[in-house]
Image (cartoon, rainbow, N blue to C red):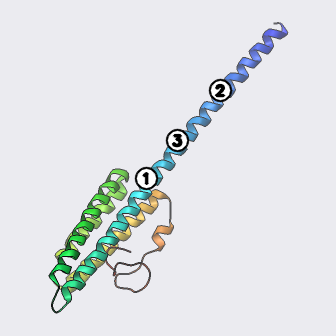
Amino acid sequence: MDAGLTALLGATVGSLATLGSAMVTGRAAARSQFGQWRWQHRRDAYANYLGAVYDRDVALDALRDALRADQPDLRDVDEKMERFAAQVRGVHRAAEFVILEGPPSVVEALYGVVHAEDTSRKAADTTLAAERDHLLYQAMKGLRAAAADVLGDSRMRVCSRAPGSTGGSPGGGRSAL
């Protein structure tokens, strides 16, 4: 074999090795970018849901305050009721994104929150209401933990508090942890 053919063969092998390496690196980068994109969408969906739940709870507190007055102002009550209804729709809309973006573990935790909210709102007895409020709190804590596991962020689980305690996160001890 002459030197020219050997050089050509060596250059071909080197080029193919470089091309193969570039393809593997490109695929790994694409996979990594897709993973980051998916993580960001999930994080946004979870944060939007938790924010919508908080906003709904604030609107509910305002509505309750308006109804507690000796002579409730019906216009004020109507305005607060409309705001609360809009916030409830926002929670449902945000939940749909969690269902679309989240893995089964997060969706299951979300359904636990929905079930706990439903039973909590139906309780008339204060003792039963407090017990169901605690179940709702536990369900929200489970949702946050599932979201944190999916996102790989343990800081989300640190921000919990018991229902009715003061300080920490807002929401009056209901579903906002």
Q: Which residue is at the far front? A: 75
Specify the quadrant that holds the C terminus.
bottom left
- Left or right relative to 131: residue 6: right
Q: Amino acid at mark 2?
A: Leu
Residue 18 placement (x, y as % from top left): 69, 28
From the image, tell me which residue sits under label 3: 31
In this view, the residue in front, 23 or 80, is 80
Tell me the CA gap for discs 3 and 2: 18 Å
From the image, tell me which residue sits under label 1: 41
User: In the image, what residue occupies the spot 52% across and 41% down?
Assistant: 31
Residue 163 placement (x, y as % from top left): 34, 81
In this view, the residue in front, 170 or 102, is 170
User: In the image, what residue occupies the spot 36% across and 74% down?
Assistant: 176
From the image, tell me which residue sits under label 2: 19
Q: Which mark sits nearer the N-terminus, 1 or 2?
A: 2
Q: Which mark sits nearer the N-terminus, 3 or 1?
A: 3
Q: Which residue is at the far right? A: 3
In this view, the residue in front, 139 or 46, is 46
Q: Amino acid at mark 3?
A: Arg
Specify the quadrant that holds the N terminus.
top right
Q: Nearer the viewer, mark 1 or mark 2?
A: 1
Q: Secondary structure at mark 3?
A: helix
Could you say which quadrant of the image residue 61 lies in?
bottom left
Q: Secondary structure at mark 2?
A: helix
In the rendered image of this protein, does residue 95 appear above or below residue 78?
above
- Left or right relative to 139: residue 30: right
Q: Which residue is at the far top? A: 1
Residue 67 placement (x, y as % from top left): 18, 84
- Left or right relative to 59: residue 124: left
In the rendered image of this protein, does residue 53 appear above or below residue 44?
below
Q: Which mark is residue 20?
A: none
